[in-house]
Image (spheres, helix red, strand yellow):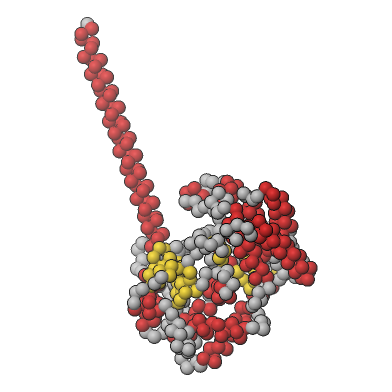
Amino acid sequence: MAKGLFPRAWVKKSFYFQARISFVRVKYLFLTWLAVLVGSWVLYVQYSAYTELCRGHECKNAICDKYRKGIIDGSACSSLCDKDTLYLSRCLSTLADNQVYTGSWGDHDGIIRCKLGEVVHLELDEEPEPRRETPVFDKPTRGTSVEKFREMVFNHLKSKLGEQTNLASLVSQILTVADGNTDGRVSLPEARSAWALLQMDEVLLGLLLQDHGHTPRLLGFCGDLYMTERVHYGPLYGLSLPWPLVSWVPSSMQRSMDQWFTPSWPRKAKISMGLLELVEDLFHGTYGSFLICDLAAAHFGYTDRHELRLTDARAVVSEDEFKRTMRALKCETDADCVYGVDCKTLCDLSEKRCKEEPVQPNLAKACGTLKDYLLRGAPSGMREELERQLYSCMALKASNAGQMNMEHSLILNNLKALLWRQISHTKDS
């Protein structure tokens, strides 16, 4: 009896074992197929996003086509289109109509920016249409004299910056930049390139601030394609999380993580002094006052000598343009009176119009940005005083102009002096 049962039990166990193996094989085969499917989808999405955002070849072709037709010219045109010594490297674009690449030009590493026409989104069954380009190179027209072009530039600057006593010297500086081949005269193609660049506020503001070392230097241009010095360290602080993790990490934890990836405290102090000096130069600058309307860390970087650079001048607006824009805004509450990210005014409820005076000056917002950055790792002997001064700075309001000017200068100078005393004896100074 026992001998008859043994083969039957063995066969039964063998059957279950083989069934188990078959189930495991099917399970892993399914998981492998699922992983391949998901991986292929991710690669497709990434590739689609890349081809949609990264169109540097289109930008170069469009610019060089206009250069070869004699429509535009500039200091970088020959290197980009004839000699091929100006290269577009890694794509950094976040918008399809605003191309951003790292690049090299001889011994220079830089960031190359170029505008493209409107991107046309197509369905699968539609035929592709030509890209709709904005005619940015139609001014000045043929027959325009240099003096007429000078007047055009002057009026454009006046509309952007308001009445300033030294606009004439700024016009001369811009005409010098426009003379790409440095032959002492501005040709019509060079003038068209310069005019296209001036329509972009970030280029104009970059030129205004680069003499103080606050923005990367303009290296060259061709049409509305231009190259600036590369700032190798950025953003100012923080960590760029992969997109699947962003929604899962709490904002409080993200703020803490932002402060983990920063330089040593003396170097942070030097970088912070650079931001305070930028605020000081914007408060009553050579060409009027300006507001920083987005103090996100992503808009700032620093050099290997820990000198701050404003890497995205689109965050800055002239006070004259800001007031003009806010006066035209209708409102129901204060929440309707916002320019950019954080330039706010109050709503005049009687007239249903936004007031023109900003609620917070640049310095108060800068101190809010620097608070966690500077207090983390601050020397114990000055931490309490530093915290007190930062909170006094953050409490600044744009009240009476004369009183605000005095308070602004006092708080700014005290904060800079406190930081300087702490790092003046170190190699980071």
Most foreground residue, 171 or 155: 171
Instruction: Tell me the quarter of the picture where residue 404 sits.
Output: bottom right
Provide residue 141's location: percent of width, then percent of height: 48, 89
Residue 205 visible here = no
Instruction: Name which residue lies at 69% across and 61% down.
Output: 417
Provide residue 94's location: percent of width, then percent of height: 47, 62
Q: Quadrant of the N terminus?
A: top left
Provide residue 7's location: percent of width, then percent of height: 21, 14
Provide residue 420's location: percent of width, then percent of height: 66, 60
Most foreground residue, 392 or 326: 392
Instruction: Name which residue lies at 23% across and 12% down.
Output: 6
Vertical arrangement, residue 324 with respect to residue 349, above or below:
below
Most foreground residue, 42 or 413: 413
Instruction: Tell me the quarter of the picture where residue 309 sits.
Output: bottom right
In the image, 419: left or right of 87? right
Instruction: Name which residue lies at 38% across and 79% down.
Output: 78
Residue 242 visible here = yes
Most foreground residue, 247 or 198: 198
Vertical arrangement, residue 283 with respect to residue 140, above or below:
above
In the image, 164: left or right of 57? right
Tally the numbered discs: 0
